[in-house]
Amino acid sequence: MRYLAFLLALLPNFAQAWGNHSPLCYLAFERMPEVAGAAPVAAEPLVDFLRDQEAGIASLLDAQEAWARAHLPGHARRPERLRFVPAPGRADAERRAAFLRALRVSPQARLALYMQPDAREAAPARPAVDASVVMAVRPAAGNSQRFVALAPGELVAPLAVLASACDEPDYGHDINLFDDNPGNPGYAFGRQPFGNPAIAIGSQAPFHMGFFHQGAIFDTLAPSFARTFTELRIQQYGGLAALAWRTGHAYWGWRFAGLALHHVEDLTQPYHASAAPGATLAYMMWVNLKAQLGAPADRQGLVVLQGNRHFVLEQFQTRWIQDAARQRRDGPLEQALRNGARDARYPPWSDAYVREVVAAEAFAAGPATDAAVVVGAPAKFVTDPTFDFAAHEAELGPELARDMQGRRDALQAHLAEMLGNFGAHSRNALRGLLNQTPQKRP
């Protein structure tokens, strides 16, 4: 039964949750003692870690696959041919390719040595790096990422490694991995469960979203929406972080930790934890029925409006953080991100935390978030179902920023609450990863 199949067209626009995660993570972690007090680490090429810990990585990835089969509903089993098998005599390039296959991450994933500097700081002396060195996808229009090079052995602050890596999974790690995607690498993930398989950026959506709380009726009508792979990525990267810290590869401990945290942070975004935060299930079913009877306008309007509201929220948050960084301004969003007092509101980190705490909170906040966007943004961008903001983002982004100046207070207060959740869940997740390595803290 595919009564809600029209939502497949909606979700590609939501593949990215918070724009650039790195500026948010610099703020979220800069006062966390475990990060701020950590000693600088030596930048290390990935192949050095893989070569040194080949056997340990092989055992870890096998254990993670067994865990996923036992604990993750809808998990797509990793074929035996993709296992990471120790082979000390092989070339580094072959070892790296085998590692990406076993993780079932895009073969084009760069995992280069780089850093995304804190936007509040003066321009670093390190040489700039073109985005193509770091990203396997073309940067989005108006992107804020700026990269500098790291040399092997160069000392770098763990905060910079962590905050840089928190944005990295959006650089093409999860693009075109499903069986019906163009050029898929044969990872046996099956058909793409939602999102348009013909649109590359949309193919990463099932790795960055989690619809765990839609309810039994929705799950029955649209069962493919339950197949998401966020928890798998968190387990994979989190386990690799613990292994790296435990074995003296501190740089990759912080780097893999950031990769894991990205997927946690994506689920703090209500548009990533709910199929359509601004619509009830009854309304979704009604507009879909009308479309089946030959009147698709309301259905298409819902798709456009949900996409527009997500883009408006992301644009507002991104531009606010960027402008504040350039002006060295410390406002309510910045204060919310670093507010460590919020952390104790939640239970300790566990395997169930991302589903039962992070996604549940974001799903519950969906209707209020959607309403706050409608109140806080110009009507043109959030209430006109014939206006597709995504198709005009580059030229209309500045117009949106200008027109929101007089309206932003209504949205800012709600966004501060959401970014407070972002910061708290990021820190709690990192504490959980660090607690896996009590005998050798980085």
Image: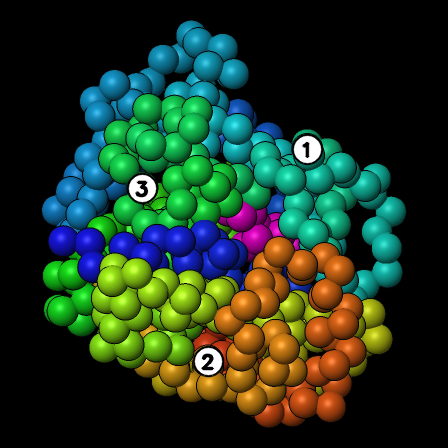
Q: Residue at 65%, 82% (x, y): give it.
A: 378
Q: Which mark is residue 370?
A: 2
Going from N to C along the chain, the mark reached first, 1 or 3, is: 1
Q: Which residue is mark 1?
A: 133
Foreground of the two, 297 or 249: 297
Foreground of the two, 98 or 253: 98
- Separation of disc 3 and disc 2 at Cα? 27 Å
Q: Amino acid at mark 2?
A: Asp
Q: Which residue is mark 3?
A: 192
Residue 193: image location, x then y, percent? 28, 46
Tell me the SS state at disc 1.
helix
* Quarter-of-image position of residue 348: bottom left
* Magenta stretch: includes residue 316: no
Query: How many neighbours does mark 3 have within 10 angstroms: few (below 14), some (14-19), or many (20 or more)?
Result: many
Going from N to C along the chain, the mark reached first, 2 or 1, is: 1
On screen, residue 28 versus residue 179, left or right, reads right
Magenta span? 157-170
Q: Amino acid at mark 3?
A: Gln
Q: Residue at 74%, 81% (x, y): give it.
A: 403
* Magenta stretch: includes residue 164: yes
Q: Is residue 67 above or below residue 44?
A: below
Tell me the SS state at disc 2.
helix
Residue 109: image location, x then y, percent? 53, 33
- Separation of disc 1 and disc 3 at Cα? 28 Å
